[in-house]
Image (cartoon, rainbow, N blue to C red):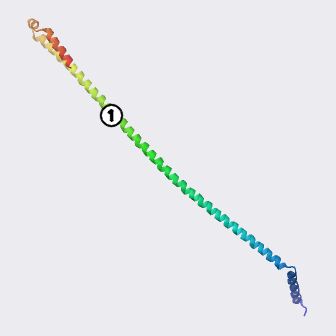
Amino acid sequence: MFDATFWVAISFLLFIGLLVYKNVHQIILNKIDSKILELKNKIDEAENLKSNSEKLLSNAQTKLKGYNKLNAETLKKAQKISDNEIASSIEKMKKFLENKEKAAQSKIEQAKNDAIYQVKIISTKVALETVEDVIKENLDIRTKEAINLSKLKKSIEKLKEIN
């Protein structure tokens, strides 16, 4: 009748009774409630951190979009300025080359005119010398006296002035 199982059952009932008498169940419930409250606080804190993180991420993405837009605008402005500078430089270079070409053409024309003038002077001198030599050889002394030598010299001077 009073075997070991019986005494184990009695000990168990006494232990349960002692736990009820000492309000151990209330202590356990309080501990569980405090753990639940602590977990709820941690969850709320995590949600707050998550929402703050999402706000910060949204702000950062907005700023990033703004910076990207600003960057694109700056690049467009820089490209436009660069294109304008290139066009201006090309235009200046064209004008410079045109001026150089005009100057070269002018120098060529001047050299051509100078050469023509020099040829005229030389040909006039040669022609006059030839005429003098022919006249000296073909005319005798009396004929030379008959021709007014001064008129001939004046004619020669006029020819020189023409050229």
Which of these two is toward me, 100 or 80? 80
Q: Is residue 70 left or right of residue 131?
A: right
Residue 144 percent across, percent down from the top left: 11, 8
| Residue furthest bottom in the image | 1
- In the image, residue 83 sits, relative to residue 117, either above or below, namely below
Which of these two is toward me, 38 or 149? 38
Question: Which quarter of the rendered picture does the C terminus lie within?
Answer: top left
Residue 132 percent across, percent down from the top left: 15, 13
User: What secondary structure is marked by label 1?
Assistant: helix
Q: Is residue 21 left or right of residue 115?
A: right
Question: Which quarter of the rendered picture does the N terminus lie within?
Answer: bottom right
Residue 71 percent across, percent down from the top left: 52, 52
Please give the count of numbered marks on the rendered protein.
1
Which of these two is toward me, 85 or 121? 85
From this viewpoint, is residue 125 visible?
A: no
- In the image, residue 110 sits, relative to residue 27, either above or below, namely above
**Residue at 57% across / 59% down in the picture?**
61
| Residue furthest right in the image | 2
The answer to which quarter of the image holds residue 107 is top left
**Residue at 87% across / 83% down in the picture?**
15
- In the image, residue 118 sits, relative to residue 132, either above or below, namely below
The answer to which quarter of the image holds residue 123 is top left
Which amino acid lies under the numbered mark 1 shown in the image of this protein? Glu
From this viewpoint, is residue 137 visible?
A: yes
- In the image, residue 144 sits, relative to residue 41, either above or below, namely above
Q: Is residue 39 left or right of residue 159?
A: right
Residue 36 percent across, percent down from the top left: 74, 73
Label 1 packing within 10 angstroms: few (<14), some (14-19), many (20+): few
Mark 1 highlights which residue?
Answer: 101
